[in-house]
């Protein structure tokens, strides 16, 4: 009887292992499956519009039955990302949001964060929003070199602790600038008016958001916060060109972070086959003539990057975090 029980136990173990292995094999592929795309942003915002536009093309090129967009707003992109963090890593749940906001929430020590951005699996970037440091005509600053020779604090009007705030904090440290933070402004238009009036020296915004005031002569661009110069203004240097040698890694990390802007990602431990299928499908979607035409019609430009490239940026950001985190924490202490 004892021997028989041992044989039965062994047989049961084999059957259970076989069933689990079969389930894992089936879950590894997203073909024919329904994928939920978590967007932890507002329903009517640009992030949701991008997701709705791209989702059918991910389904088309992955062979998935459907890619359903699920809006999960809350906590500055944190609630939905926390949900994804605990999802099954079989490719059935992926996310799409502003990657910089997730990184900064984690680096700044937000108690709401349950995820680790270094362990998420990055699947590709849909678009980025090149950013620029502009200064007012009353600031006395004309070039990036003037920032290095500024013998007084740089006055920065801010709407809050968003990615532009944190970027300015790291940038000031990298350039050896003293920074005077003025909080409480209501959005980009408000900070822009402060700079134009001379109440502040400059601001960080998207290039597109600043083109009007630049072309009007009210503000001038001095630094591109990206890894490459902005094509319409090729004479404006990047932050990596202007930074002090000892700060190159921190500035490169900020540039990489901002470049990751509108990105797709999966939970930790995402199955390798599902990862490859999704990365391939997302890259193929961005080359689809129908999606390109639709993006032009909706005025939602595509500036894609593949998942492996985006994963590499996260590693560089993580490597530089030992330098960045103390800078961010010191800035937060100053405004409390």
Image: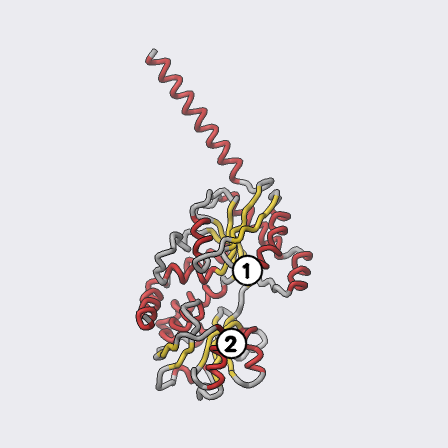
Q: Quadrant of the C terminus?
A: bottom left
Q: Looking at this view, is 65 or 235 the one in front?
A: 65
Q: Is residue 106 left or right of residue 283?
A: left
Instruction: Please give the label number shown on residue 3.
Output: none
Q: Looking at this view, is 116 or 194 the one in front?
A: 194
Query: Up-down: is 217 above or below 37?
Result: below
Question: Residue 235 placed where, x, y %?
Answer: 53, 80
What residue does disc 1 label?
47
Question: Residue 254 placed where, x, y %?
Answer: 43, 67
Q: Is residue 253 left or right of residue 303?
A: left
Q: Looking at this view, is 269 or 276 the one in front?
A: 269
Residue at image position (46%, 42%) is 88
Question: Mark 1 and mark 2: span between their CA atoms?
Answer: 21 Å
Q: Is residue 153 left or right of residue 258?
A: left
SS assignment at label 1: helix
Q: Quadrant of the N terminus?
A: top left
Residue at image position (36%, 79%) is 180
Residue at image position (57%, 60%) is 44
What residue does disc 2 label?
189
């Amino acid at each position: 009887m004892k021997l028989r029980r041992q044989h039965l136990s062994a047989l049961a173990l084999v059957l259970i292992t076989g069933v689990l292995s079969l389930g894992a094999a089936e879950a590894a592929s997203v073909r024919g499956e329904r994928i939920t795309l978590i967007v932890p942003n507002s329903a009517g915002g640009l992030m949701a519009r991008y997701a709705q536009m791209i989702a059918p093309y991910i389904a088309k090129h992955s062979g998935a039955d459907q890619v359903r967009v699920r809006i999960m707003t809350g906590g500055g992109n944190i609630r939905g990302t926390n949900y994804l963090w605990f999802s099954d890593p079989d490719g059935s749940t992926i996310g799409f949001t502003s990657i910089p906001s997730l990184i900064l929430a984690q680096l700044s020590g937000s108690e709401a964060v349950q995820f680790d951005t270094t362990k998420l699996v990055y699947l590709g970037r849909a678009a980025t929003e090149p950013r620029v440091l502009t200064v007012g005509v009353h600031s006395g600053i004309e070039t990036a070199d003037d920032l290095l020779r500024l013998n007084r604090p740089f006055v920065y009007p801010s709407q809050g602790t968003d990615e532009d705030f944190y970027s300015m904090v790291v940038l000031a440290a990298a350039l050896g600038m003293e920074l005077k933070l003025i909080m409480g402004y209501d959005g980009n238009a408000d900070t822009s008016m402060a700079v134009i009036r001379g109440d502040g020296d400059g601001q960080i915004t998207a290039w597109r958001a600043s083109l009007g005031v630049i072309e009007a002569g009210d503000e001038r661009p001095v630094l591109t916060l990206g890894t490459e110069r902005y094509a319409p203004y090729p004479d404006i240097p990047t932050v990596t060109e202007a930074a002090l040698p000892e700060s190159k890694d921190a500035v490169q990390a900020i540039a990489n972070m901002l470049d990751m802007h509108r990105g797709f990602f999966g939970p930790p431990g995402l199955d390798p086959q599902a990862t490859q299928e999704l990365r391939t499908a997302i890259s193929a979607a961005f080359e689809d003539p129908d999606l390109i035409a639709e993006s032009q019609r909706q005025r939602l430009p595509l500036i894609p990057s593949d998942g492996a490239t985006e994963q590499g940026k996260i590693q560089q950001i993580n490597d530089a975090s030992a330098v960045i985190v103390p800078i961010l924490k010191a800035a937060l202490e100053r405004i409390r």
